[in-house]
Image (cartoon, grey):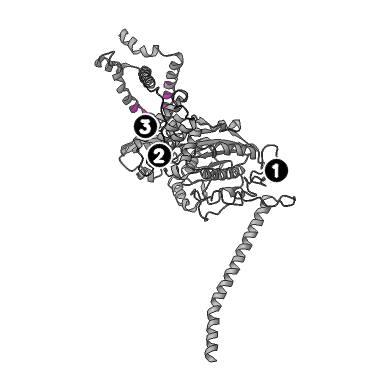
Amino acid sequence: DDDDDDASLEGIENKSPKDAKDLFSDEDEEDDSDEDDEFAELGDDSDEDDDGPLEQDFSGEESGSESESDEETLLPIEKKARKEDARRKREAEDAAAEQVLNIEDEDVYELSGDEDDPDAPPDLQHVQARIQEVVRVLQDFKSRREPGRSRGEYVERLVADLATYYGYNTFLIQYLLDTFSVAETMELLEANETQRPVTLRTNTLKCRRRELAASLINRGVNLDPIGKWSKVGLLVYDSRVPIGATPEYMAGHYMLQSASSFLPCMALAPQDGERVLDVAAAPGGKTTYLAALMRNTGMIFANEFQKKRLSSLVANLQRMGCTNATVCNYDGRQLPKVLGHVDRVLLDAPCSGTGVIAKDSSVKVSKSEADINKCAHLQKELLVAAIDCCDANSKTGGYVVYSTCSITVEENEAVLDYILKKRDVKLVPTGLEFGRPGFTSYRGKNFHPSVEKSRRFYPHVHNMDGFFVAKIKKLSNKLGPAGAEDGAAANGFGKATGDGSDSEEGYEQVSGSDDEVGEGGDGYGVGVGVDDEVPEKKPAGKKKNARARMLEELKAELEAEKKAKEEKRGKEKETKEKPAKEKKEKKAKAKK
């Protein structure tokens, strides 16, 4: 017995104090989560299944019967210790094998010219082998490069081959290589080739997660909790029935929603009884989550610009039982004039979609630098409007959450750096337990240090869609940064400074919801009328308040409608009188 005990604890004795502490802390956290989480038992089966293959790693030390008996008597911490030992052993063997291969591959790789026939289909195996060789050279460029070849030539060859192999345009591949390392770019491209796991969110207004899981398991759905960071998410592995057509789905017990879409709502953390604005609400996944977090109290303004998407938004709100939501159809840039102040604002802005390439493969070839710049300009306008809608004097709120499903810096950190200069706001921690911090510098551009408080999520790191989340605290209701006068010059979309980057009135130069949709398909007409030439400056005078401007606009609209009606009546009168006039002339001619 003593020998068995010593053998079972052999893995723990070799642990460093830090690792042992981690193991115990992990175990304690699991125990705590099992007590708090009503659905903790679903993870037990997977842990027991994972222990089986590890018996083979210790087959050389003990017989099969002895190992089986030990496995039954081992404590969970001992099992984890054995798993860790086996993992380290495999890593050491892999590292040794890789070292041997590297020693054998120390020869210089010659970068051949473009020998492929442009008219013939590409040989993907040959392209893949060339990619691996170029990546190997770039990892140790000094010793493996061909004499007389520059690093730029190898990178250019890699960009062309990656674009051919994965089906991207060269701009996007070059952008990823400029943003990430070569190895991480390869991981990201591979992750974009596989679909993200199917996830769903429990509607706590109607049921608990444990009850929902039991119902779906009885219907043949194989699922697990999504993770410790969410108490309402479920991860679906496979299902015998259509997961979007079950009786539980029809009854509004859950919502099919990507894991990354949970994050903005969790960061916003709305409180009971607050007034909350969702600037881009359709199809309603985040709006219904906000309603569940608020327990159907307070008021949610669910705004959607595209009329064709309102039907799905209303349907989901009704199915999920959200009674505190009001649906509206406005341009997000005009909301400050319509709604006034609210306690919290959620802006999941329209973006280029570079984080959801696994869902929409058309992004690989359809996006260019101009598209990203147009999206960034629209996002700046929407974020300014969202902050103007937020009430800095709110007792419980005063927060704005900005999120995109893009991984480009121009649509994320650059927008935050812009808004910090245009409004009296500051960035605060998102409250999310995981995710990479935002970039504070990119390709020679330095951003505000607080931008690091934002969070980035990647498919190859977190196994969810590429996403960006930032939480902003509004410090005052001034239309400008701290210390600036409350005037047009301080307004983020007030008088332009002459560089053409800001229009004269950002809230007024917008397209309607029935206007033609731009190439981006977001319904906002990105880039239309926002970079026009700056008009001549009017003489300085007393600034009109918002109410006076609204009255003038309404008056102008009424006069325009009246004029249009008069013109229409005149045309109708002419069309009616014309046949009678012609008939009269014919009669006169006949009489003559």
Judged by depth in the image, the label closer to the viewer, 3 or 1, is 3
- Give the Cα distance between marks 2 and 3: 13 Å
Q: Nearer the viewer, residue 393 or 590?
A: 590
Q: Among all residues in the image, which is located at the extreme bottom?
A: 592
Q: Is mark 2 on a helix, strand or loop?
A: helix
Whichever of labels 3 and 1 marks the residue nearer the N terminus, that label is 3
Residue 91, x across and y down, in percent? 38, 20
Whichever of labels 2 and 3 marks the residue nearer the N terminus, that label is 3
Q: Which residue is drawn at 60% across and 30% down?
A: 449
Residue 109, x across and y down, in percent? 41, 27
Residue extent of the magenta highlight: 27-46
Amino acid type at image mark 1: Asp
Residue 57, x across and y down, in percent? 31, 18
Residue 214 in sight here: no
Q: Mark 1 points at which residue?
A: 486
- Give the Cα distance between marks 3 and 1: 61 Å
Q: Name the residue under label 2.
A: 164
| Circles 3 and 1: CB atoms closer than 8 Å | no
| 481 to 449, vertically: above or below | below
Dot 1 crowding, Cα within 10 Å, few <14, some 14–19, many 20+: few
- Give the Cα distance between marks 2 and 1: 53 Å
Whichever of labels 2 and 1 marks the residue nearer the N terminus, that label is 2
Amino acid type at image mark 2: Thr
Amino acid type at image mark 3: Ala
Residue 586 in sight here: yes
Q: Nearer the viewer, residue 179 or 201?
A: 179
Res 129 label: 3
| 94 to 551, vertically: above or below | above
